[in-house]
Amino acid sequence: MNHRLNRILQGIFWILVYLFLTLLPVLVMFLPPRPPGREFIREFSVALGFVGLAMMALQFALTARFKTIKSPYGADVVYHFHRQISILAFVLIVIHPILLFVPQIHPVSILNIFSPETPWRARFAVTSLIALSALIGMALWRKPLKIEYTRWRIWHGILATAAVAFAMLHVLGVNWYINVPWKRLLWAAYSIFFVGLLFYTRVWKPWQLLRTPYRVREVKAERGSSWSLVAEPAGHSGMQFQPGQFAWLTAFNSPFKDAEHPFSFSSAPAADGSVRFTIKELGDFTRRIKELKPEDIVYVDGPYGAFSIDRHPHARGFVFIAGGVGITPMVSMLHTLAQRNDQRPLLLIYGGKDLESLTLYDEVEALKERLNLTVVYVLENPPDGWQGETGYITREVLERWLTPQRQKDQIEIFICGPVPMMNAVEGVLAEMGFFAGDVHSERFDLV
């Protein structure tokens, strides 16, 4: 209980920090000295602009992978918040000029950045808004537009940097609400903070990864068009991770190329620092994993995530619900429990198309001999004579196996797999009365 309380308190602390940094520019704006004779709608517009800009700048902190910030929530929750708050910031920033145009405080012609009569502060604002619009559009429609992930990440970073930089120049150019040195100091601090985050994410972090490479030990074919990549530290002690966590993997490129991808560990923490990822062929990068050879160099940035049994040491048992390659963090946790000779009751519900597509099936079967583990396979296309569950992981399946011995407040439930499956299972568990705090999911469909 102390672990959970500490995480709750940490989570509340970081939320308060975020709110303070978001609202600080508005608080400073209303402190004297203030420009006289300004209409309410103008000042309201400026306040929305300041809040939106602060949110934009803080987005870099949310994606900088500071483990202390993400620890109370989990990386997927932080990235989901990052996505939603980006849309809110965009709306606030768009409303900011609209409130000035409706009462004709400024003419709409000021948006023409090519007109010699348009002041530079307006040109900076329009350029920032164009960059931000492109940023939001590419994030929302990356998949329909079929923009390759690595290319999208590069442009995402470029557009985000341009949007914040030009917005800062706009604020400095307007100068109405930062007309005293100590107010300028605030925006100087935000600018330094922004530049510092860029340096950390684009220079310092890649340089650290370059100094701690991993050497490929083995690449092994698995069921379900998947490959297990085992890598060991090259000249360093490796990392300590909790079973179920994930890391960002860079292969075929330098860490400076911004070509990394997130994958769960599929192994238990090892004494020699080696790590294993089991990766399904789903895209350009994942299809190339089989091309890696022993002695090739890869880079591993981690660990991240709150999806781990180690965050719930007092649970009386665990339930794992997996679909497809979502089995990988479950196997990591099961291997760890086996190493510890942990005999708490465990239930794994694993859905897939057929037996041949169940990644790491043989390992799951072997783990049954070492653990107090019940495994339920749910197959869409079962073989002849199959006596197990068929179809999908439905409410009927869950009600059959989540018996009274596995009731709320007694167990921790972990879900990982395709997003539709996770959404459906989470909804069913809520209807069955399971406490949301006991249900944990891991999503990698971040954009």
Image (cartoon, rainbow, N blue to C red):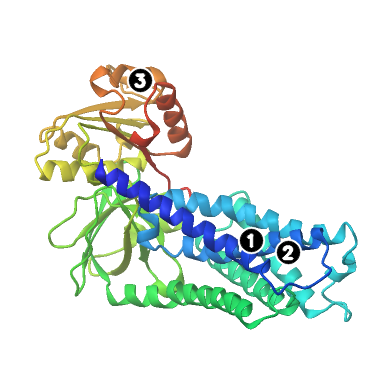
Residue topped by disc 2: 46
Kindly indicate whether the residue at mark 1 contacts the one at mark 2 (C-beta within 8 angstroms). no
Residue topped by disc 1: 51
Give the camera-side residue of 311 and 360: 311
Q: Is residue 324 above or below residue 105?
A: above
Of the two numbered discs 3 and 2 in the rendering, the one whose residue sits closer to the viewer: 2
Find residue 107 and report its horizontal and vertical position in percent.
90, 66
Between the C-alphas of marks 2 and 1, the distance is 9 Å
Between the C-alphas of marks 3 and 1, the distance is 47 Å
**Callout 1: SS:** helix
Q: Is residue 417 above or below residue 156?
A: above
Residue topped by disc 3: 397
Find residue 27 and report its horizontal and vertical position in percent.
62, 64
Give the camera-side residue of 217 and 114: 114
Q: Amino acid at mark 1?
A: Val
Name the residue: 31% across, 49% down. 6
Whichever of callouts 3 and 2 sits on the residue coming sooner in the sequence is 2
Q: Amino acid at mark 3?
A: Val
